[in-house]
Image: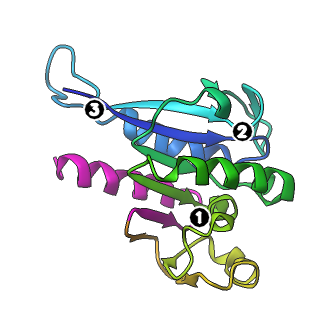
Amino acid sequence: MTRIRIGILGYDGMQALDLVGPADAFAAALADADAATPERLYDVSIIGLTGRRLVCEGGMVIQADVTIEKAPRLDTLIIPGGAGLRVPAASERASKWILSRAARTRRIASVCTGIYGLAPTGLLDGRRVTTHWAFVQDATRRFPKLHFDADALFIRDGSFYTSAGITAGIDLSLSMIEEDHGPR
């Protein structure tokens, strides 16, 4: 069985759980959990926006597998939220890279304020989206072409997925796993 490649964009100032929650959900998806050596269904890579050492908002340090310059082809790209992506230089760099990968990526998702990296690409224009409720007003002002639903846990609109606050990224990841392999 060919594993599905998941890439999670990492950057300084991200929310650790926005990355770790989805990474662990995909890593825990096994073809036959009761087998002596269960087969993983996903390969998860952390892709650093700048360097390989990433410092999260809370101070946790995460090591990226590769940087955006050497990132492999992906089936799914996940953009975690965090204050670091609301910095214009980081948002611009992330959105340029996301846009360069979009045509070759089956699905792209943002967790919480990861929308600040995905929305500037224009790929979400005219689409229904969500983010953490505390950022809906600011995001609506910055990205007026998006249709925000502040009450949704996560939303799929075409090949684009957005989720609300931190732990909603885990729920979103579980729904993607179910989409790929069914509810079991």
Marks 1 and 3, how far apart at CA: 26 Å
Disc 3 or 2, which lies upstream in sequence? 3
What's the distance in space between the residues labelled 3 and 2, CA to CA?
25 Å
Q: Amino acid at mark 3?
A: Leu
The residue carrying mark 3 is 41
Q: Is residue 86 left or right of residue 66?
A: right
Q: Going 75% across and 32% down the picture, which residue do you hit? A: 54
Mark 1–mark 2 Cα distance, whole angstroms, equals: 21 Å
Asked if residue 183 lies in the magenta stretch, the reply is: yes
94 to the left or right of 148: right
Residue at horizontal 60%, vertical 54%?
99
Q: Which residues are magenta?
A: 159-184
* Residue type at numbered disc 1: Gly
Instruction: Give the crowd class for mark 3: few <14, some 14-19, many >=20 residues within 10 Å.
Output: many
Quadrant the N terminus occupies: top left
**Mark before the other along the chain sequence, 1 or 2:** 2
Indicate whether 70 appears above or below 99. above
Decide: is 165 above or below 41. below
Tag shown at residue 165: 1
Task: Return the residue at label 2.
Answer: 49
Query: Do callouts 3 and 2 mark residues in contact (Cβ within 8 Å)?
Result: no
Mark 3 or 2: in front is: 2
